[in-house]
Amino acid sequence: MEGRRKSYRTWDPQHNGDDAIAPREALPEGDLVFFLIDLIPQLDLGPFHAYYARDLRGQPPFDVTMMVTLLVYAYAVGVCSSRKIAAACERNLAFRAIVGDDVPDFRTISDFRKLHTTALKPLFLEVLRVAGELGMVKLGNLSTDGTKMRANASRHKAMSYGYMAKEIARLEAEVERLLRDAERSDAEQDAALGGRRGDELPDELKRREDRLAKIRAAKARLEAEARARAEAEQRRRDEAQARREAEGRKRPGKEPAPIEWSPEEKAQTNFTDPEAKIMKQSNKGFDYSYNAQAVVDGEDQIIVAAEVTQATNDKQQAVPMAQAALENLEAAGIERPRGADGSAVPIPNTADTGYFSEGAVAGLVEIGIDPYLAVERQKHHEEPDPSESPVPSSASVKEQMRAKLQTATGKVLYAARKQIVEPVFGQTKSARGIRQFLLRGLEKVSAEWQLICLSHNLLKIWRRSRAAGES
């Protein structure tokens, strides 16, 4: 056996390095990149073009359709960093198929994403319209859920309200000391050298004054947030008291604790992204995050509404998300199901126990939604109530909802929730690797979430078109 060697296929790296490869020849015919290259130009990109119509001077920018296609494809395959996108444009055949030989640098990509945040909402609706035209949105079960997405903010760039007061006092003392030192130095130099400009600010003093200004601004933000919460709580108490007086009832139980108008000592704010909030993560830890919400249709997991909130829980999100879904469906031209008499039929909406409240149920019914909100953790393999006997009119909203979920219809609809909305977050975080926002601030983060969700919808549309072509 010695001296014998397996034959291998010829490998010539020098020739390979010089060989030109065409993306359309090397990539599969039905690749996602070619699907997007064909589809994106057919969408209404007017909001993107409108930005450049304001100023026709200067060098021509990169083609808007190309940049939109590049950004959508990058997010679809989980490449979100502008530097990584720029690198892929130089090394990846699929990216080269979009940009060709004129490769935008990372700053151009980053600026394009930041400049056009307001245009991403209309683009989300355009993609939703395409999904509706393909029959991928049936409105048989809209499922709502949220996931915590890490913010682009470091936990080490934060400070508590209690520590701020101490840090402000310390910095004020240091600034005062540095000013005295500067005055003494000026006097000594004047005596030795004569007059000087005197408008130079020592670097050490400038750094402390800048930090002092930032801490004061952060302290003011926390105080404003505390006042807003206190005012909302005061309004709630006043309204409840007015209802009791109108009904001739007394306040049940003890007097509520006084309203706190100042922030708690442990209340924190972040200097990198002040609008991000500390939220509990799935790994039981805490990090600066946003609460990314989605409403997903049960037919093909198409996201019909995507919003971001700073709320750490989902208690107040059921009605706003359902309302956003209805508005998006109307804007995308997707009609609601109608009965024999032509009237709109309430759309079933499922959500876990984090969304339940009496107010949420009433609000959903009012806007034409048929809610199926869990009131407690659902037990597995529990048989539905075959009788479906009517619930007494005296039963509470919670009891009525519990009974509704125990019916055969309620069981089927709620069980499907785990196959509708929860996989969407798994596909986003695990399959595409998108676990953190790159932009900062609620407005820009909301736009980035729209981009993430519209790229999810495009992946679903692409897979549907491939399946239809193969059948």
Image (cartoon, rainbow, N blue to C red):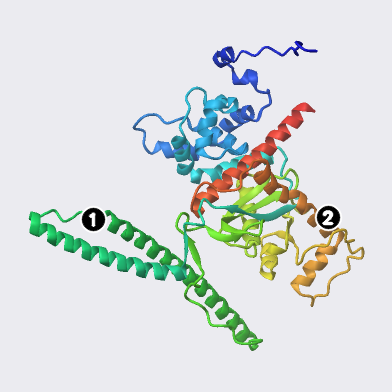
> Which quarter of the picture shows residue 145?
bottom right
Task: Kindly report which numbered mark, 2 or 1, lies closer to the viewer in this rendering.
Answer: 1
441 with respect to 384 (left or right): left
Going by the image, does 394 lie left or right of 22? right
Residue named by callout 1: 201
Q: Where 7 sits versus 396, above or below?
A: above
The N terminus sits in image quarter: top right
Q: Residues within 10 Å of mark 1 (few under 14, many from 20)?
A: few
Name the residue tied to disc 2.
412
- Above or below, 449 against 229 in this view is above
Image side of residue 344 versus residue 269, left or right: right
Q: Position of residue 9 (x, y in %)?
A: 70, 13
Q: Quadrant of the C terminus?
A: top right
Q: Nearer the viewer, residue 189 or 27?
A: 189
Q: Residue at x 76, y 31 (%)?
A: 467
Residue 146 percent coordinates (x, y): 65, 55
Q: Is residue 68 visible?
A: no
Q: What is the CA distance from the residue labelled 2 to the residue labelled 1?
A: 70 Å
Amino acid bearing label 1 = Leu
Q: Is residue 17 above or below residue 274?
A: above
- Give the number of the disc on residue 15: none
Q: Amino acid at mark 2?
A: Val
User: Residue at the spot x=68%, y=62% of the render?
Assistant: 364
Q: Return the residue nearer the eye: 364 or 192.
A: 192
- Give the number of callouts: 2
> Relative to the observer, which residue lies in front, 428 or 359?
428
